[in-house]
Image: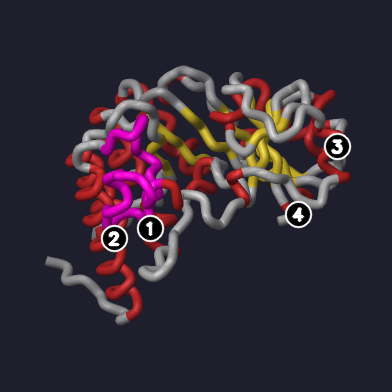
Amino acid sequence: MKVSSRNFVCPHDPALLGRFRGRTVAVRVDDPGQVCTAVTDVAKSGNKLLCVILSPRLPLDTVKLFDEWKDIPVVLMCPGLGRFRKLAGRLNLCRKLNLRVFLPCSRANLVGLRILASLGIPCGVTFGVKEPDWEALTDLMTYAILGAAPHAAIEPFTFIAHRYKPAEHTKWGCVYFDDPEEFLHLDSSGHVAFSQRELLGGRFISREIDRLETLDEVPGIADDPDRGKGIFLENNPCSVCGGWRLCRGAFARKGRHPDGCSEFFAELMEVVERFQGLSAGGHKQQKW
């Protein structure tokens, strides 16, 4: 794949934005007051805004939200929901904005995401190094895909439900800007990596953003269609897991297969296939 077809994910840095043109950019900020400024700077640089990724390290109930954001796609990465009674007074503003709220995968946050979705606020769950509570995650997944009551999207489950194909590998990393075929990640120095994790770990594919325009292809494992084959050559539980088509070993940690991972993805595929069957048949659920 040509590098020029990939979008950029980068920090809000006018000097960095000025080093390239004609790109679609997801720009990262950590202060709500920087959102509108980031949008202006992307436009001035000759690039197109995909969204603003706001990571304020504050619970949602204390994050400042502004009416001026109404035409700006904002991905809000918060550590938690906070106190709902404080958030309740701002629900109308949340629904009016082009906002998507992501919370880490803790039991409390999984409950919080269900509340947000039920109130019409698009949201999603993020995964870290800690193993999820698979039972609670299964409950949220089932609600996201098969819940009869109206609710907003809960990612990555809504994305998977509409794109899953039984005979293919369904990639859903783009929900988190983590698909090397669609996104490249930059730091303020112009270093380039396939993902934010690799960028922070110093695993760069290039140390000069200016050189990317001269490359026809970016070599590396992310473009290797055979990546993952090593798992099938090893005595790895992922090699016999029925959820491989969706998980691709994403939850394996140093060769260890998490408890509950296989069962979760098997149930996810079952729920998605049921959803797609109902959608294809035009089925309308009973009201009682």
Q: List the single residue furthest toward the bottom.
A: 281
Q: Quadrant location of residue 42?
A: top right
275 relative to 59, above or below: below
The residues bearing labels 2 and 3 have C-alpha atoms spaced at a distance of 42 Å
Which amino acid, by three-letter code, is at mark 4? Lys
Residue bearing mark 1? 245
Q: Secondary structure at mark 3?
A: helix
Marks 2,3: beta carbons within 8 A? no
- Whether residue 221 sits left or right of residue 168 in the image: it is right
Nearest the eye: 143 or 87 = 143
- Whether residue 204 sits left or right of residue 48 in the image: it is left
Marks 1,3: beta carbons within 8 A? no
Residue bearing mark 3? 211
Question: Which mark, by number, is residue 2?
Answer: 4
Q: List the single residue furthest toward the left.
A: 288
Which amino acid, by three-letter code, is at mark 2? Met
Residue bearing mark 2? 269
Q: Secondary structure at mark 4?
A: loop
- Whether residue 89 sits left or right of residue 177 in the image: it is left
Give the magenta range. Answer: 231-257
